[in-house]
Structures are given as C-alpha cells and as structure tokens.
Amino acid sequence: MNRSYFSFLNRIIVCGPTALAFIVIPLSVSAQDVNSTSSDYVSRAEYDKLKAEHEAMKQELEALKATVRQMATAPSPGAAPAQPAVPAEGPSENKQVVTTTSTVDELRQEVDALKLQIKETFPGTTKFLLAGYGTAAFTARSGEDPFFDAAFNALFLWKLTDRLFFEGEMELEFEDEATDLNLEVAQASYLLNDYMTIGLGRFLNPMNFFVERQHMNWVNKLPDKPLAVYDGIFPESEMGAQLRGVIPIGPTKLEYAAFVANAPGLITESDDVSEIGMLDFDNDANFGGHVAVGGHVGFIPIPEVEVGYGIQRSKVGPRDQAVENILQSVDVNYVRDATWLKGLINLRAEWGWSHVDHFVYDADGSQGFGPLSFNNNRNGGYAQIAYRPTHLDNDIVRNLEGVFRYDRINQMHTPVGFDEQRWTFGLNYWVTPSAVLKLAYEVDDKNGGARDQNAFMMQAAVGF
Amino acid sequence: MTKILTRICKWIGVPGAIIVVSCGGLTWLIGCASNKPSGEVSAGAAHPEKSGAQLWAENCVRCHNIRSPGSLSPAQWEVAMMHMRVRANLTPEEHKKILEFLKSSG
C-alpha cells in the first residue's frame, strides 16, 4: 500500500509540471490577451481569480515535492526502494530521481534492519541460542586397535531476563558400543550485581582453568586432552552453587569464583586395585554426605596475561572414617596477537595437585589386598605453545597453526604405580574461527614398567 | 618429597580459602554500593577510554579464536554475550561496549 502511494507521488512529480504547463500556458496567453487587446473573453475579476488559483496550485505542487523528498530521506517502514525507472521529464524530475536513487541503499539497510526487528519479535528467537560443537576423530595408538569416534555436544542457552541466564549442555558420544548421553552442565545464573553472579546447578569446575575454558574441542588445540587436569585428578563438573565475578582494580582485573558442591567419593572397593584410593567425581548422590568448598582467583594484569590459583577441599570416604582431600591448581596463560609476531601466539600451562590423607583400605582383608594404607598424592599438568601466522597474506598459511604440548602425571606411589609424560606435536587448519582440522603425533613415556603408547590422532571439530 | 607436598597442601589450603572468601566479600560490598541494572556503566569504570572494538579484540581472543560480529545476529549476540559475561567474568562496562560493537558491526 505504501509502495503504491509512493509511486503515486512520484507520478505526480512527473506529471505535475506537464499538467501545470497545460493550464498555465493558455492562462498566460489569455492574460496577455486581456492586457494587449482588452478582449471581451476574460474579465479582470476572472483573470485575478484564475491567477490566485494558479498561485495556489504552484504552492501545492511545491508542498507535494517537499513531502516526497522527505519520504525519500526518512522512509517509512515497508517503503520499497524508489524506482529510478520512472521516465525523467524536465529538470525538477531529474533532480528527484537522483535524490531517490541515492537513498536506495539507505532504504535497503533500513528495510533489512526492520526485517530483523520483525524476526526478533517471533516467539522463541529473542532470548535463546543453540550452540555447542560436533567432533569426528580418528586415533591410532600403539598397543590398541585404531578407531574412529564421533561426539556431539549441544549447548542450550537462554537469556531469561537481563539478570537471569540458563545454560544446559548435553553430550552425546559413543562409549562401549552404545550411545552415551550425559548432562554436562545445567546451571541457572543470576547477576546479583555488576560484580557478582550466583550460579546454581551443575557447572564446569571453576577451579580448573582447562576444564572451564579450554576443553571444548573447537577451543582445545590438540585432538586429545592433557593428563591430570582432564579426566585425571580434578572433577570436570561440580554439583552445587557458585559465586563468581570480577573486581576491576585500575586497569587490571581480579576474577574470583567460590563454590560449595557435592564432595568426591573415595573409592575403597573395586575389582581393579589400581582404582583403590582414587576419587570418584561422579558422586551425584553425595555418598558420605560431605560438602566440598572451593574456588579460583585469577589475576589479569594486562589483557594478554592471566595467572590463577584454584583450590577445593572436602572430606572424603565413609562418614565415620572420613579423611581430608585437597585439590589445588595453578594456571598461567599468555595470548598475544601482534604485528611483530606476524600472528597469534598462545602459551598455556596448568599444574595440579591432589592429596587424600592417610586411609586404611580393605582393613579386614576381605577384598584380598588389605589392609593397605597410604597417603594418595598425585600431581600433573601441561604446558602448551601454539602459533598461527594470522598476519600473513597467504590464505592457507594464515589458517595453519602449529602446536606443541608437554603433559605429565605423577602417580608412582599410588596403586596405579607409574608416572607418565608425553610430547605432542600438532598441526591445525582453521576453516573458520570455530571449525578446525587437527593432526597430531604423540610420544608417550611411562616409567614403572608400563608400556609406552605413541599415538597418531586426527580430529575435526566444529563449534557453532 | 611427599611429606613436603602434603605440608604445602595443608598450609596453602587455608590462605587460599581466605583469599576466595575475602574476594567474595569485597565484591559483594562494591557491588551493593553500586547496584545498578546489569549492563550499565558504573562510575569509575576500568577503561573509560577504550572502544567496544578494542575491548572486543582484547578480551574475546583470550580463550578461543575471535568470531566475526557477522557470525551471529544481534539477538543471538545478546545471549552469547550474557554467557560470556558469566564465563569470562566480564565487567559490566566490557559487556555493554562489546555487545554494542557486535550488534552494530554485524
């Protein structure tokens, strides 16, 4: 409707002067007649009346032109771009066409913005985002059959109000010839104030930098994850409540997170003796009824650097013989994209310690290995460097990234009975900022008579 | 070696917990003193001179590759940025300026 109104106005602009010419020319002729020949045809009064009408029409035309110009510069919703195809007749006409053509781009932008605004009002699209990542991998590890693997992590994000947020993550992966569905994260976060957010539910372990911020396959730079800090001595997620936020101190920042959660379980019975004295982090039912208290502080002196310390303490084990468990971690991160480096450099390191106090396992010998008593102390972590020449002109080279990681776990004096260290060399190709193809070779070294298992790994990961 | 480690663990555990608790308490106080709707820039903002684009370039590359503003719609950025505000502990000023930048450059 607006569109036809607009073109109607345009037509008036085109036809207006022509029509006016038809009216005015005879009029001026008759006026001359009046003056020169004092003819009988038009009286003075009639002439004055006609002249007044002519003036009024001229004014009306000017007003119309102004309206059209206004509409062109500040178009109304739904106004289609003016069609420059309208034939140009006369100088004022040309001017108008130029004006409308120059506003076509603006109109188009406006229409796009409006379309988006309309889309945003559709129910369900305003505050919800489906994110996550998909992974396909191939691993050939010496001493094991090579295998293909795939996983899918869906992340459901809702912004319910300016202060309330919910995130849920589900992981679908193949394990033991079956598809496994895990609820990794289910957390409601509420912004108590500008510097403090409370989170309730199941959340990624804030005391472990790698788990909370690096383990996602489109973020992690190698096909596998470092020893100790992932699937090792720390829990991946916690079930409980956390308080977190940031304190700006001048140009620097201090991040913090504090949490209470279900404590890990202590494995006191198992068919596999190497598991005795280890921690069970999937303690959703909170056997033993202990509560873990922990947190993380991170200092960011300049945006490129972050240094952090995390800790978690709890009692573990059966209620009447509970012992102390302390988990600690230190992390250092340096990320710099600089011209003099011709690219992006990523340096990350994290080291962790786990201590379970002295406990007597299989005290009555009924399991066949006891009584066995020990302090369970383990530690380990990784250091990694990655470089990508993002400033080079060549499209292929610019998307290549070289990675080197050293990771290690020390657990010789536990029932596991060996330490392990690895050197991993990787080459990545970034198809988009969140889609990557990874190739890596890992050199493995275990002591204590355990078999070294070098590996060749490939992984494709897409974050969305 | 093991004993030393055990001792360090025990010793550092208490101060560690104190740091976490006192940081929490301090933030609570700061926050309550300047309790405003989220996204508003507080007085004494950390980087009044930095633009949204600059804060985006500095902050969003810390953990993962930076995604272009056009990769999500303004409505989607609102959700993702709230996620990142919590995950990356962004200040309200960083959150507001970066979100404005992402929405306007997309």
Image (cartoon, rainbow, N blue to C red):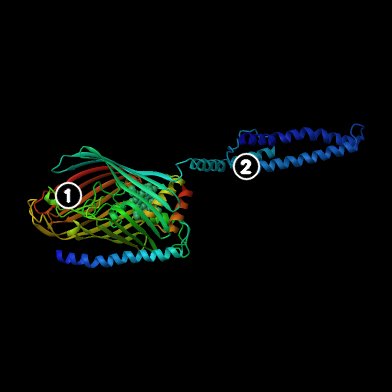
Q: Looking at the image, is mark 1 or mark 2 earlier in the sequence?
A: 2
- Per the rendering, the mark at residue A443 is 1
- Please identify the quadrant where the N terminus of chain A is shown: top right
Q: Position of residue A126 (x, y in %)?
A: 46, 44
| A56 to A386, vertically: above or below | above
Q: Position of residue A292 (x, y in %)?
A: 26, 58
Q: Residue at x 19, y 67 (%)?
A: B7
Q: Is residue A211 left or right of residue B103?
A: left
Q: Is residue A15 left or right of residue A332?
A: right
Kindly state the secondary structure of the residue where label 1 is placed.
strand
| B31 to B82, vertically: above or below | below
Q: Position of residue B54 (x, y in %)?
A: 43, 56
- Please identify the quadrant where the C terminus of chain A is shown: top left
The answer to whether residue B62 is seen in the rendering is: no
Q: Is residue A161 left or right of residue A342?
A: right
Q: Quadrant of residue A51?
A: top right
Q: Position of residue A267 (x, y in %)?
A: 17, 52
Residue type (three-letter) at the residue carrying disc 2: Ala
Q: Residue furthest front?
A: A320
Q: Residues within 10 Å of mark 1 (few under 14, many from 20)?
A: some
Residue type (three-letter) at the residue carrying disc 1: Val
Q: Quadrant of residue A5?
A: top right
| A205 to A59, vertically: above or below | below
Q: Chain of mark 1?
A: A
Q: Residues within 10 Å of mark 2 (few under 14, many from 20)?
A: many
Q: Quadrant of residue A448?
A: bottom left
The answer to which of A416 and A241 lies nearer the viewer is A241
Residue for badge 2: A72
- Per the rendering, the mark at residue A204 is none
